[in-house]
Image (spheres, rainbow, N blue to C red):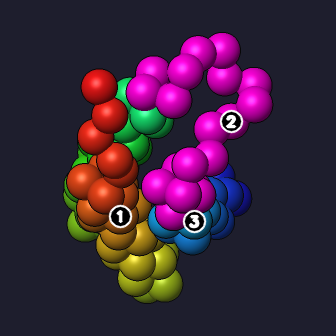
Amino acid sequence: MIELISVVCSLVICVLTPIEVNRIRAGWVNQKFEGDRPRFIAAYRKQLVMLMWLGLGFGALTLILSLLEAEPGERIFKVVAGAIWFAVAGISLISQRRLPVEA
């Protein structure tokens, strides 16, 4: 069940991250953020870097764990879940590069 929640959350990250980056590029700043736009972009960039490393880590871990599975369907599910986490890492890297550079 935890693996299913992980897959759903990673798919949500894959969809929402590009949407939020486009909003930030258009000038949006979260109202709850206490600071100016350059600080918000720097904080969001750090968040994307963290998501990139988490995606790489969870993707690699899930692929390694898929080798240990004995059930026939679980192995395929874990490979797909690992691929989705690698997609999170790739989307985070691309989104980080698309953010505007403001000093």
**Residue 49 in sight in this render:** no
Amino acid bearing label 1: Ile
User: Is 90 or 20 nearer to us in this picture?
Assistant: 20
**Residue 97 in sight in this render:** yes
Q: Quadrant of the N terminus?
A: bottom right
Amino acid bearing label 3: Ile
Give residue 30's position: percent from left, percent from top: 68, 36
Residue bearing mark 3: 19
Of badges 1 and 2, the one in the foreground is 2
Give residue 23's position: percent from left, percent from top: 58, 58
Mark 1 residue element: helix
Q: What stretch is highlighted in magenta?
A: 20-39
Dot 1 or dot 2: first in sequence order is 2
Residue bearing mark 1: 91
Q: Are marks 3 and 1 in contact (CB under 8 Å)?
A: no
Q: Is 29 left, or right, of 96 in this rendering?
A: right
Q: Is 97 left, or right, of 17 in this rendering?
A: left
User: Is 41 or 71 nearer to us in this picture?
Assistant: 41
Residue bearing mark 2: 30
Dot 3 or dot 1: first in sequence order is 3
Q: Which residue is drawn at 64% across and 52% down?
A: 2
Amino acid bearing label 2: Asn
Is the residue 45 above or below the residue 57 in the image? above
Residue 25 drawn in magenta: yes
